[in-house]
Image (cartoon, rainbow, N blue to C red):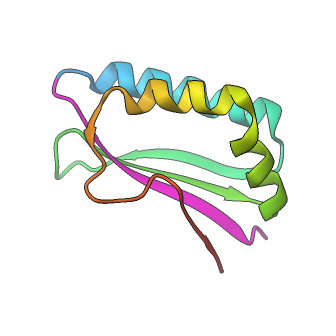
Amino acid sequence: MADHYASGTWQVKQGCDQEFIDRWTEFLQWSRANYPSIVVANLIRDRRVPGHYVSFAEWTDEASRNAWKQNPEFMARFDACVALCEHMNGADFDRVATV
């Protein structure tokens, strides 16, 4: 069972939904291919609020999650997703909790 997770809340610019989904999917595929310690990685659309998404990843351990975030390619791929967002609904991109 994974003990660590990361989540984010995204408000996508109007008309950019498909591009955001495509970029996020590419980001998740890269992450899964390079970091097998990701147990789950999802992007969920909130059907009640247009342009609102939630991302979620579970990790086997915190060290693996930290290695992912320290990879130089991580920020370039992450920033490509962020560039399509208006704001984060007050959420911190890097909210991480241990359960």
User: Residue 14, located in which quarter of the rendered image?
Assistant: top left
Picture coordinates of residue 50, whole percent (x, y): 17, 41
Residue in view at x 81 percent, y 40 percent: 35
Residue in view at x 21 percent, y 30 percent: 13
**Residue 89 to residue 28: above or below:** below
The N terminus, quarter of image: bottom right
Q: Is residue 36 magenta?
A: no
Residue segment shown in magenta: 1-14
Image side of residue 21 versus residue 71, left or right: left
Residue in view at x 80 percent, y 46 percent: 67
Image side of residue 5 versus residue 68, left or right: left
- What secondary structure predominates along the stretch shown in magenta? strand
Image side of residue 8 versus residue 33, left or right: left
**Residue 82 to residue 19: above or below:** below
Picture coordinates of residue 27, whole percent (x, y): 59, 29
User: Residue 59, located in which quarter of the rendered image?
Assistant: bottom right
**Residue 19 to residue 40: above or below:** above
Residue in view at x 69 percent, y 44 percent: 69
Picture coordinates of residue 42, whole percent (x, y): 54, 46
